[in-house]
Image: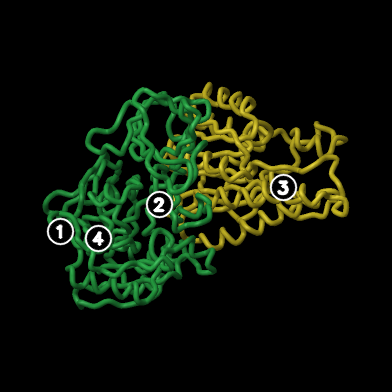
Chain colours: A yellow, B green
Amino acid sequence: MEQLNGTVALVTGASKGLGRAIAIAFAREGADLSINARGAAALEAVAVECRALGARVLAVSGDVADPADRERLVSLTLDRYGRVDVLVNNASTLGPTPLPQLADTDPVAFDDVVRVNLAAPFRLARALVGGMLLRGAGLVVNVSSDAALNGYPGWGAYTAAKAGLDGLTRVWAEELTGTGVTVVSVDPGDMDTEMHRAALPDDDPASLARPEDVAEAFVALAVAGRAPAPRVEAADLRRAVW
Amino acid sequence: MIATATDLPTLPAALRASGPAERRGVRRDRVRLMVVDRAAHEVRHTRFDRIAELLGPGDVLALNTSRVVPAAVRATRASGQAVQIRPCVRRPGEWDVLAVQAAPPFANVPLVPGEALRMGAVSARVLGRRPDIPLLWRLRLPRSEGLDLVLRHGEPIRYSYVPEPVPLDDYQTVYAGPPGSAEAPSAGRPFSWELLGRLRRRGVGLAPLLLHTGLSSYQDDDFDAQHHLYEEWFEVEPPTAEAVNRARRVVAVGTTVVRALESAADESGWVTPRRGWTRLAVAPDRPPRAVDALLTGLHEPQASHFDLLRAFVAEPLLRRAYVEAIERGYLWHEFGDAALII
């Protein structure tokens, strides 16, 4: 059964890894999709995969941290579908790898990580949450990380941004209580992705979750249209019905 | 009917808001609000967020959710001359545009029928002047091109009283939805979600609709004074029609909302869901039927805006409001203060 028929979902960072898996999982469930990533060719390949599953897909390439690109993403999506029901802020960057300690972190790279991982999700959600509030329904999912809660050496910029994203989510979720609009951050756990390999090349892929499996947690959230808490772990969402 | 408001005081240049309230250190919902109370025949002065005290259960705020697009589009003529085109009516494969200089003072540029205009890699063909509004040019472009061309090559239309570029985000209302307005439907700009939430809790309904605004100026004072109206796209969906028909009092947030609702209303003021183009001009000889009250920005008395306001307010009270707004230093235009006619 297609559980997301009639749902319009916007997924950023959708050309590979978790974003791609979420887009494909949403497509399989019948969602109308707007997908975004910087690389147009890889994004179009995902669009083709999703269309093959019967989904309507708008692919808008661009950098979520760039105001003009972000405006194109928002405007073209709203022009095509009239609204967004589910926003998945998945686009994310580690910054330069191998990951430097904070004392060695290039301040420009730090700013870039904060722009992509924290400011862009805020700005994108802010552009779309108004429509959700008018309709009294909507879901914003911010992809977080266990790094947000820990002090892993080398992960300074990423951790600062993801912890900020968790904080943003907590406040927004509180402010939107009773409006029908949910904001949640999801820790997907360690996955076998290009990003994980870049950060931790020595990890055994067999010990990591597959993005396709983790994506099912995002389907569960989108179907429910709400979340059990402002911060959840994907593994728990896949295990439990709440 | 054309307003003759020449005896009204001239607007001092300093009262033209040069940018968003937030950049002046004022929250968007804390700009000033002038209340024109028709029953009491008086003009009062308050702050925008106190509008919640003036509205209550049974009132419906009708909101234009149209998103502003960057409608000052860079183009190049075959001669190599840079020109700015401002699309105001967009249909698949065909635009009606104002063509102006690429830099201030943005005077009109006569195009040549048959010539090609390039926007990035896309070429548009000039078909000729629009017969009913000769300052507008009809362009043909590939049917696959449309909004994205504007988004890629445009910037927000900015008039001389806004000296510095303002990011497109700053023109949007907090409830902006589908894109298409050439200029900001700015009456709703002062609303914050905090304020809209408070209004909802007071029992005030929020009813969204869509009207993509065109241009407020043809960049030609004489032509502007003739009030040439062209069609604008609007959409009134069933839930909004129902909410408006049920309302004790319908407050239009902006003149664009008046235009949309009145275009969807019959002679008795009953609103039916509709979408399409409208050229309706609400004025004293065609007063509002569905709309009871109006929240509006402050615009120059010479503008056609004045004509529409006269459909709501008897002229002596309206003139008093204009005079008081100027005397008290209200800020005007899209980033300025607001007025509520109840």
Quadrant in which residue A42 is drawn = top right
Chain letter for mark 3, please: A
What's the amino acid at mark 1? Pro
> Answer yes or no: do the residues labelled 2 and 4 have beta carbons within 8 Å?
no
Residue displayed at 52% across by 35% down: A34
Q: Nearer the viewer, residue B123 or A147?
A: B123
Chain letter for mark 4, please: B
Residue B181 lies, in percent from the top left, at 38, 45
What's the amino acid at mark 2? Ala
Q: Say which label, 2 or 4, has the lower sequence index.
A: 2
Residue displayed at 47% across by 27% down: B79
Residue displayed at 49% across by 24% down: A54
Disc 2 target residue: B184
Q: Disc 4 to disc 3, how far (Cα)?
A: 48 Å
Mark 1 surroundings within 10 Å by alpha-carbon count, few (fewer than 14), some (14 through 19), many (20 or more) = some
**Residue B210 shows up from this direction:** no
